[in-house]
Amino acid sequence: MDGEDVATLVLPSVLDLKAVGGLHADLLAVRGRPLTLDASQVSRLGGLGLQVLLAARTTWAEDAQPFSVVNPSEDFTGALDLFGAPDLEPVASEASDPFAADSNSADARELRS
């Protein structure tokens, strides 16, 4: 994998309803490439933001593309813990992903399109 092919997106400081539309568009624009999400600026992570990140993680796994989250802020990791999603590492397979049953959600379907 050539480092130039990796897409890096910096997550917004507030990842809520207002931010997910832009994030979703950014994710669609880099689909098919290895992805690194920089979570260093996140001060608030909402449920919809988490949904988009989980759908992206699943989509990148289905596309067999590397997916990583780097530089997570304390607020980001704290929110993940509160949501019961302590990390966003790539999924090994749908069978091991507790969210795989929801792979037909609107977010997951749209990211796959």
Image (cartoon, helix red, strand yellow):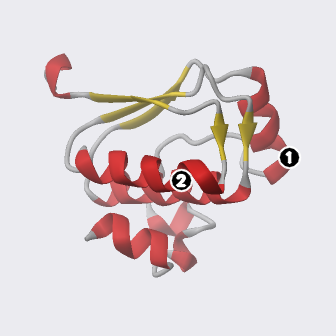
Q: Amino acid at mark 2?
A: Val
Name the image quarter holding residue 93. Answer: bottom left
Q: Quadrant of the C terminus?
A: bottom left
Horizontal and vertical percent position of residue 110: 36, 71
Q: Residue furthest right?
A: 82
Mark found first going from the N terminus, 1 or 2: 2
Instruction: Give the label, 1 or 2, closer to the camera.
Output: 2
Horizontal and vertical percent position of residue 52: 53, 57
Whether the residues at callouts 1 and 2 have beta carbons within 8 Å, the answer is no
Q: Quadrant of the N terminus?
A: top left
Q: Residue at x 56, y 48 (%)?
A: 19
Q: Residue at x 56, y 78 (%)?
A: 101
Horizontal and vertical percent position of residue 41: 62, 22
Name the image quarter holding residue 45. Answer: top right
Q: Say which of 83 and 66 sits in front.
A: 83
Q: Say which of 17 and 89 sits in front.
A: 17
Q: Which mark is residue 82?
A: 1
Q: Which mark is residue 20?
A: 2
Q: Is residue 93 left or right of residue 99?
A: left
